[in-house]
Image (cartoon, rainbow, N blue to C red):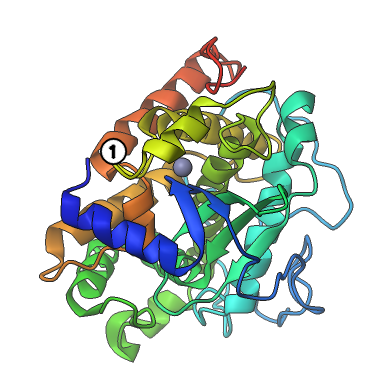
Amino acid sequence: MMNPLSRVRSLGLLLAFGLTASGCETSSSSQPRYPQQQQPPPGYYAGGQQGYPQQGYPPQQGYPPQGQPYPPQTAPQPTAAPTTTAPLPPVAYDPINATDINFLRGRAQADIQELIGALDSQKQSRVAGIPLVVDDRPGEVNAFASCTKDGKKMMAITDGLLNIEAHLARAKATDEIFGGNKTDQYIQFLAKYQKPGAPIVEPAAGFFNPTQDTDGRKVARQHEILDEQIAFVLGHELAHHYLGHLPCTATGVGVTASEVNAVLSSVVPVFNQPNELAADVNGTYNVLNAGKKRPGYHWTEGGGLLTMRFFAGLDQFSPVDVLFGFERSHPPPQIRTPVIQQAASQWRSSGGNPFTIPLPGFGL
Ligand SMILES: [Zn+2]
């Protein structure tokens, strides 16, 4: 639950950007401030690794050639097992190591298409073609589902969140391949030095060991982790749309529970907790279903759990209150983490066909 001060700050932030909110679902009363970049610029990722140096670049398992279908997969995969353990040549340039924001935006566009492609036809029809817009406000760390004033659905992920997810992927891959605890070190670094509203702080050049940072196995692994994280964040927001939590994609007539909660959001926490948890459950299923369709590495819930680990650590280590929009508009990680774990467990134990709660807004 949020304290009153957080709530006031949250409302102030949202009003400042012309949004009314019921959690990470928002209804916009104005057009997005930033140009909508629904496609990555020419030369950037579009289903393969075009546009990047090929020499010395590791095989990108899980990145199918453009336009080619995924081969069918059957058995659900267990949690987080790096697929790349054999030695690979060092990588001179990697867009995650370089925090190349255009590459990261391109991955978000590609990941959301994989998520939509893994939905059943009814849900898919509700979100097909949904625009994912760029949000480059400095220091903003969030993702949200929204309706415009014209009733059009949209989603956004901020550059700040993509930057952090890239560093987390880089640190987590380093820990998995070489041992150590770069992940917590990065989280503590950011908690210590990040200032509200300022661009995301970058670790010093020596933070990552150069030899480890260019290691081919580590670089390949960080691409898997990055996509897994982005897929969870976007899978959650996508679920708000296809579950009908927003007026522009709600089914039926009359006011929805979400709309009621939006009205009530001035007196209760600004997120609708049942909707948030339903979005986590369905988003986790969506990530695992999309992962199952991938060749090579299969996405797991590990990306969602890493994102939760970051925000939990931020709360723990920050000497000042660096609340990001993501934290203001979602339940705390201590609530979300077990929900994600239980959803993944249910998905696996049911052979990838988990029971869906038969209540409106929960997956029907
Ligand atoms: Zn949400």
Up/down of 95 relative to 133, above or below: below
Up/down of 251 relative to 113, above or below: above
Q: Is residue 344 visible?
A: yes
Q: Residue at x 66, y 45 (%)?
A: 296
Q: Position of residue 265 (x, y in %)?
A: 36, 41
- The C terminus lies in quadrant: top right
Depth check: give the residue in front, 90 or 157.
Answer: 157
Q: Position of residue 42 (x, y in %)?
A: 82, 78
Q: Secondary structure at mark 1?
A: loop
Question: Residue pushed farthest right?
Answer: 67
Residue named by callout 1: 268
What amino acid is labelled 1 in the image? Val
Q: Residue at x 67, y 50 (%)?
A: 112
- The N terminus lies in quadrant: top left
Depth check: give the residue in front, 109 or 9.
Answer: 9
Q: Position of residue 204 (x, y in %)?
A: 30, 88
Q: Ligand 1 within 8 A of label 1's CB?
A: no
Q: Position of residue 56 (x, y in %)?
A: 65, 79
Hey, which quadrant is residue 299 in on the image?
top right
Q: Residue at x 80, y 33 (%)?
A: 125
Depth check: give the residue in front, 357 or 267.
Answer: 267
Q: Is residue 364 left or right of residue 267?
A: right
Depth check: give the residue in front, 237 or 248.
Answer: 248
Q: Is residue 308 left or right of residue 245?
A: left
Q: How many marks?
A: 1
